[in-house]
Amino acid sequence: MSKPSPARYRTTNWSSYTAALRQRGSLLIWLDKDMTWLAPHDGSPGRPALFSDAAIQFCLTIKVLFNLPLRQTTGMVASLLKMAELD
């Protein structure tokens, strides 16, 4: 018994196919403008924390998501903040 040939699909609407491929590569990152990047002073002894826990978690998420080293992560986060017009 012979194996049936696989179905062959043909693209007929190239403009929507190209648009779908272009959209597949898009990246959307939402940044909350009300998020505090600097850590509040908690009054405990020792050196105060510089960044908030939310800011550190955001940077680590970007690092793991894109498999970046630390220096590239800081550069990418800085450019994202600059594009979002955040300090």
Image (cartoon, helix red, strand yellow):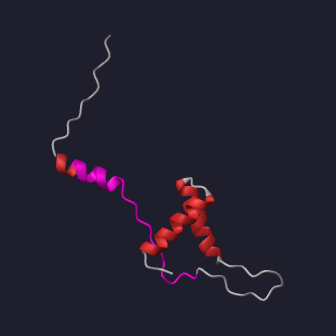
Outermost residue on the right side: it is 45
User: Is residue 80 shown above or below 37?
Assistant: above
At 29% from the left and 20% from the top, the residue drawn is: 4
Residue 32 is left or right of residue 56, and the answer is left
Q: In x, y percent, where is residue 70? A: 62, 60
From this viewpoint, which residue is outermost toward the top?
A: 1
**Which residue occupies the foreground of this view, 65 or 5?**
65
Q: Is residue 56 left or right of residue 33?
A: right
- Is 29 a magenta residue? yes
Q: Position of residue 69 (x, y in %)?
A: 61, 56
Point 47% across, 80% down: residue: 86
Residue drawn at x 40%, y 61% as measured from the top left: 27
- Point out residue 9 in the picture as x, y percentages from the top left corner: 23, 34
Q: Main secondary structure of the magenta part?
A: loop
User: Residue at 36% of width from left, 54% of height from top?
Assistant: 25
Q: Compared to 30, does 22 lie above or below?
A: above
Residue furthest to the left: 12
Q: Is residue 79 magenta?
A: no
Q: Is residue 70 left or right of residue 47?
A: left
Q: Start and end of the magenta stretch?
A: 17-36
